[in-house]
Amino acid sequence: MRILALETSLFTGSIALASAGELVFQQHLPQEQRTAQTLAPAIAAALRQVDWRPSDVNLVAVTTGPGSFTGLRVGVTTARTFSYAVGAAILGINTLEVIARQVSLPSAEIWAVMDAQRGDLFAARYSRGEGARLSELVSTYIVPREQWLARLDGTAAVTGPGLKGCELRLPEGRMERAEHWEPLAETVAAMAWELHRQGVSHDVWQLVPEYFRKSAAEEKLT
C-alpha cells in the first residue's frame, strides 16, 4: 500500500509518501506551494524523488479542516483529482485529530486547538486508548479563546497552534512541546494507513473541506 498524504490546512503545509506504515518521504511546503498551480508540480517532484509513478499510489489522504479556506480547498481538490486520475482510494482526516495524534505527553485526554481568528479557537477533545488510537469526546467547535482557557481543569494535555500567545496561562505540565503543534503529512499518512486497515474509505465525489465557520464576507451578509 503506497500512500500520498497532503497537509495544506495551515500556512506551513507538507507532503508525505509512505509505504504501508513506513514513511518514505516528507517535504514541508512554503506558502507559495499551496496553490492549485504549484501543489501538483510539488507532488510530481516528490514522486520522482522516490521513483514512484502516479499510478503506484493506492491511497490518497488529506486534511479536510478546520484550517485556512484556501489551503483546505486546494488540498482537498488536489487530493480528489489525483485519486480519480489514478484510481486510488481516498481518505479525509480532521486537522485537529492529526494534531492530537502528535502529542507525546502521557495523557489520557487531549485538547487540540487552532486559531479561528477574531478571538476564537477551533477546538476538539479526544481520549487516547491503546496504540495511540483516539476517540472523540468533544467534536470540533468554535469557542472564544477566553472561554476555552477558563474551562481548562488540568486533566488533559493541550496542543495546537491555537496556543500561541497564551502559553503562560496553561496548566503546568500539560502543554505539548511547540514543535508538535503543527499538523504533519507524515501523521496524516500514518493515520490513513490505520484507517485503511480498518476498512474505512471515503467517496471521492463526496469528500469536501470542512471549514466549520463562514468566511468573514459570508458572515457580513447574514
Image: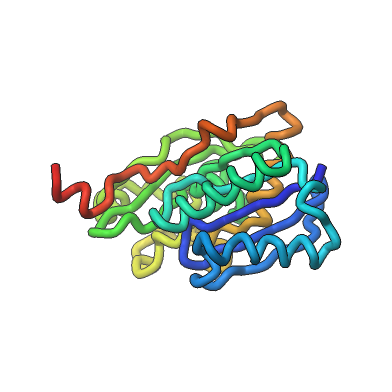
Vertical arrangement, residue 46 with respect to residue 148, above or below: below
* Residue reaching furthest to the top: 199
Q: Residue at x 83, y 63 (%)?
A: 50
Which image quarter is the C terminus in? top left
- Residue 177 is drawn in which quadrant? bottom right
Marker count (numbered): 0
Left or right of 182, for residue 47: right
> In this rendering, does residue 34 appear at all?
yes
Residue lying farthest to the right in this orientation: 51
Can you say whether 102 is above or below 168 in the image?
above
**Would residue 113 appear left or right of 132 to someone viewing this image?**
left
At a point 39% along the width and 47% down the height, the residue shown is: 123
Q: What residue is rendered at 35% in x and 41% in y?
A: 141
Identify which residue is drawn at 64% across, 65% down: 41
Q: Quadrant of the N terminus?
A: top right
The residue nearer to you, when weighing 194 against 124, is: 194
